[in-house]
Image: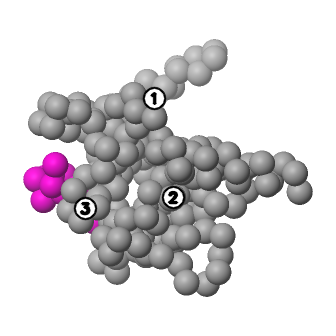
């Protein structure tokens, strides 16, 4: 599915290859037209990873550091103790960039609504954004149109990660453990 078919998303920016010798191969560049305040705002969201106008991944996040935090998980996935999903996504993005493709990020948000929020002992009224429901709706819309989920939604498609990148992930953790 092409991003121009999506009526609710806005472009946030794009990933670029790093040239500074960092173990992280990519970094994110925010589009100047996307407000910095929104980039950092704690607003739950659905994000789309788009390769040359084609949607490759649909995800959702409520990271407390906003989109900046969400995207840092991808950009910094070759340091620390990343899980396989982020590490492999980092590699997939880097591979597309090496092929000369653009990897952009788009966002969908919904207005907050008042709802009952229940804790262990009582419920209180508060504002919520149903980002999990939004993510599910986006995935369902995509699958209804395309017959499957986006190519980088491995879990939803019940696909294995690319073997070479999964092996790279295992090797990375072996090196970390044996230091």
Question: Residue 40 colored magenta?
Answer: no
Residue 177 in picture, x, y percent from top left = 84, 48
Q: Determine which of the numbered discs, if any, sits on residue 90 in the image.
A: 2
**Which of 58 and 93 lies nearest the eye of the viewer?**
93
Q: Which residues are magenta?
A: 1-13
How would you rate the neighbour count of disc 2 (Cα within 10 Å): few for under 14, some for 14-19, many for 20 or more?
Answer: many
Q: Disc 2 on helix, strand or loop?
A: helix
Q: Nearer the viewer, mark 1 or mark 2?
A: 2
Q: Disc 3 on helix, strand or loop?
A: strand
**Which of 19 and 161 lies nearest the eye of the viewer?**
161
**Marks 2 and 3: CB-CB under 8 Å?**
no
Question: Residue 3 colored magenta?
Answer: yes
Q: Determine which of the numbered discs, if any, sits on residue 57 in the image.
A: none
Q: Tell me, yes or no, if residue 131 can be seen here.
A: no
Q: CA distance from mark 2 to mark 3?
A: 22 Å
Q: Disc 1 on helix, strand or loop?
A: strand
Q: Tell me, yes or no, if residue 82 can be seen here.
A: yes
Residue beneath disc 1: 125
Q: Earlier in the sequence, mark 3 or mark 1?
A: 3
Q: Residue 112: which quarter of the image? A: top left
Rendered residue at 30%/70% (across/down)? 101
Residue 29 drawn above or below residue 154: below
Residue 96 in picture, x, y percent from top left = 37, 65
Residue beneath disc 3: 10
Residue 53 in picture, x, y percent from top left = 20, 62
Viewport quadrant of the C terminus? bottom right
Q: Residue furthest top?
A: 121
Q: CA distance from mark 3 to mark 1?
A: 30 Å
Rendered residue at 57%/52% (across/down)? 87
Q: Earlier in the sequence, mark 1 or mark 2?
A: 2
Rendered residue at 35%/51% (across/down)? 47
């Amino acid at each position: 599915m092409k991003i121009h078919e999506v009526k609710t998303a806005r472009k946030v920016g794009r990933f670029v290859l790093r040239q500074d010798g960092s173990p992280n191969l990519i970094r994110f560049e925010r589009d100047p037209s996307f407000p910095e305040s929104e980039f950092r705002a704690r607003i739950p969201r659905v994000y789309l990873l788009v390769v040359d106008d084609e949607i490759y991944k649909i995800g959702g996040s409520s990271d407390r550091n906003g989109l900046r935090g969400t995207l840092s998980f991808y950009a910094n996935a070759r340091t620390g103790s990343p899980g396989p999903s982020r590490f492999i996504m980092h590699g997939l993005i880097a591979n597309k960039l090496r092929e000369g493709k653009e990897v952009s990020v788009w966002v969908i948000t919904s207005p907050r609504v008042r709802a009952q929020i229940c804790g262990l002992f009582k419920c209180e009224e508060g504002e919520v954004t149903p980002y999990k429901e939004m993510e599910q709706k986006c995935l369902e819309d995509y699958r209804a149109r395309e017959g499957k989920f986006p190519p980088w939604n491995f879990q939803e498609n019940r696909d294995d990660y690319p073997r070479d990148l999964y092996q790279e992930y295992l090797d990375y953790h072996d090196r970390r453990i044996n230091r």
